Amino acid sequence: MTNIAIFASGSGTNAEAIMNHFSDSSCGRVALLLSNRGDAYALKRAERFGVPTAVFSRDEFLDPAGRVARLLREHRIDFIVLAGFLWLVPAFLTAGYAGRIVNIHPALLPKFGGKGMYGEHVHRAVIEAGEKESGITIHLVNERYDSGDTLFQATVPVAPDDTPESLAAKIHVLEHRHFPAVIERTIRSLR
């Protein structure tokens, strides 16, 4: 059984979809949810699933001997999922979990990626660029924002009257439908 840690910074709808998916999976289980924000609603969602949680500071995240690294060891974490987590993952984690950290991005990378491109910022940029479609990219995580190998993409049309909010709603449907399944497929491929 693969032990999964989810890193989340916000409301946690993707984290909830993942916890729900793995609640009866023979492949893996969500063993820990970590957040850099004490007010992240993802923490409450994890508590409802009985998943242990912790909040950490930037220093605790960046220190190879710090609290985050210790929590990952204590919970015997095999695989990491970034679900709405906005910080760049430090090199000691990308190296230690090479090929075992995935992220979801709310656009079709390599377009509209990089530092500061998250949430509404991405959807607004897609609309302002006049794109005819957007979607999701699920990718491996390396030491640079949004540049790891792509595992999966799915698309939705961008309508002429779409707003960042309406486009986000379409993207969320794709995220919740595909992210848990791609995580499971990736974990199974590592066995």
Image (cartoon, grey):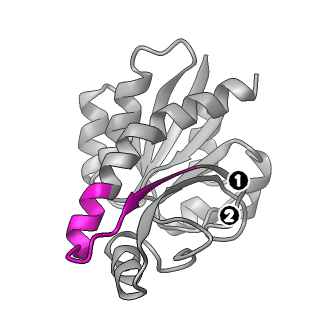
Label 1 crowding class (10 Å Cα cut-off): few <14, some 14-19, many 20+?
many
Q: Are marks 1 and 2 in contact (CB under 8 Å)?
A: yes
Which percent across, then down, holds residue 53? 39, 40
Q: SS at mark 1? A: helix
Q: Is residue 125 magenta?
A: no
Q: Nearer the viewer, residue 93 or 182?
A: 182
Classify residue 70 by image quadrant: top right
Which residue lies at the image location 27% right of the left edge and 54% below the top edge? 11
Number of numbered tags placed on the structure image: 2
Pick the residue in front: 189 or 6: 189
Magenta-drawn stretch contains 164 = yes
- The circle on residue 93 is 1
Identify the residue shown where x is 35% and y is 57%. Answer: 171
The residue that mark 2 highlights is 90
Q: Amino acid at mark 1?
A: Leu
Residue 116 at x, y percent in the picture: 47, 80
Q: Is residue 92 visible?
A: yes
The stretch of residues the image draws in magenta is 153-170
Left or right: residue 152 versus residue 162 is right
Q: Name the residue located 24 percent from the left edge and 42 percent from the top edge.
A: 44
Real-space CA distance between mark 1 and mark 2, rounded to the nearest whole angstrom: 6 Å
Residue at (33% x, 69% y) in the render:
158
